[in-house]
Each structure stands twice: as structure tokens, then as C-alpha cells.
Amino acid sequence: MALVWVDRMAVDARGNGDVVLLVHGLGGSLNVWTPLLTALEGFRCVRPELPGAARSHRAYALGDTAPHKGQLSVATHVAALLRVCESLGVTRAHVVGHSFGTIIAQHLAVEAPGLVRSLVLMGAMAEPLAAARDMLRTRAGTARQQGLDQIAEGNSEFSLSASTRQTLPVATAFVRECVGAQDPEGYARNCEALAEARGAPADRIACPTLVINGDEDGVTPLQGARQLTERLPQARLEVLSRCGHWPMLERAAECQRALRPFLQSVRG
């Protein structure tokens, strides 16, 4: 692992070529992208762990002396990604996001259009629905009061397809352990950040976009992915069968087959 630290953010940066910036979602880490790395040979893969998440739970954005007093948001995450790119000398990148990371990636494309060459959105959403916002605020309280064991168990059951739970127990175990190993306070603050997230103006996202969603995604249902794809000027949708909310874990081979040709088509 080529791990570096940027403002207390853990960042795995490896390979050579066009940059692919991979942005995980709520409860994720840089390791959620490992199944896709073979499809990204010939690219420079930059995998940060967002402030509050995984190894980055002590990142600068949690500091009480920071201007935002440690409150996380889409804006602080976009700023964190821009800081990572600046530190690593990245001026152009294909941006791949998952779940909450798809919202952050869309805002990054609006704020820094010269940086974002293309978008790949997995388990995509424009913004949470009202019911999801309430659930996220409740989950933040649960994380602080009870820890993450119950949340991790529920997440591994609800967010994966029935087929995945039956045939890929390692994926179920990974999701449970990845969520369960988060810092409770950092996870809670990210729950609150997602609860307050608002959609980026889709008409200002001009770059080519590939949306990848599972047909059994209960977290970001396929209907929402279809609506988002229709709003984005240069987007197309790839639907994966018998797949839930973690396409890169549940259907890695299919994601690889979709991802590499898309990135090759928008290189240069």
C-alpha cells in the first residue's frame, strides 16, 4: 500500500497515467475500491479516506479549532479532496464515487470543472429523501450512544442483495467489518453531513458520466439513479442484476467491464 498522509487524511496513491480519484461513501474506506484495481492498470489511482472515516477519523476537518468547528459537510469533503489533489499535484482526474461519495463527486465537478474529466457514480444519488435524512440523524445518535455494532450488522443485511448474502459471504463480512470499524464520532458526523446534503446543479455537470446501480439497491433505489441519469447532460446508466448498494464488492467483474472501457473512451 502506497499510503501517504494529507492533513491527517490517509491517501493511497499508486500507479502511473491518467489519475482516477476514488471517493468512498458513508461507512467506507479506501479498501472498498480494491476489487476494481485490476481494471485500472495504466492509471494512477488515488484513494483518500474522507475526514471522519476509517484511518482519517482524526483528519483536520474534525478539529474544533477549524473554521467549521469540526462539523462535516459536503463542502468540507469537497475541500478535502481539493487539498488532496493539490498536495499530490493532480490537476485533472476521472472521479469515481460510491453512495455519499457520488454526491460529493457531483459537487466537486461543479466547483472544479477543470479538475474533473469524467464521473463514475456507483450506488448513485442526487440527495437523500426526507425519510432517509431523518434516519441518518437517528443513526448518528445511535452511533454516539451505542457504538456501531448494531448499525454494521443492519447495514450488511439491508444494503446487499439477497444473492450477494447467499453467494458472497466475504462481501457481507467486509461491509459489516468496514462499517463496524469506523470511529463512532466520525461516523456520526458523516451521517449528519449526509443528512444535510443537497443535490448539485445537474445542468452544470458537463463531463461524461457513467452511473452504475444495482437492480436490488435498497439504499439508493434504481428509480433515483434513472432520474439522476436523465438530469445529467452526458450520462448513461449501467444496471447490474442481483446487485445491491455495493456494486464494486457484489459484482466486481461487471464493474470492471463497465469501468475500463468508459475511462478509456474519455481519456486524453
Image: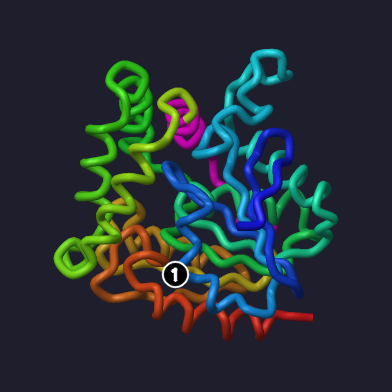
Q: Quadrant of the C terminus?
A: bottom right
- Label 1: which residue? 212
Residue 30: % across, % down: 53, 52
Q: Is residue 203 left or right of residue 183?
A: right
The residues colored magenta run 187-205
**Neighbours of disc 1 within 10 Å: few (<14), some (14-19), many (20+):** many
Q: Position of residue 218 (x, y in %)?
A: 27, 54
- Between residue 106 and residue 166, name the one nearer to us: 166
Magenta stretch: includes residue 202? yes
Q: Main secondary structure of the magenta part?
A: helix
Give residue 1's position: percent from left, percent from top: 60, 57
Q: Is residue 139 above or below residue 217?
A: above
**Residue 201 on image: x %, y %:** 63, 51
Residue located 25% across and 64% down the image: 216
Among all residues in the image, which is located at the extreme front?
1
Tag 1: amino acid: Ile
Residue at image coords 58%, 36%: 56
Say above or below: 246 vs 238. above
Of 36 and 263, nearer the camera is 36
In this rendered view, identify the residue nearer to me: 114 or 29: 29
Question: On the picture, is 267 further left or further right than 216?
Answer: right
Give me the residue at 77% from left, 58% from top: 113
- Nearest to the observer: residue 265 or residue 107: 265
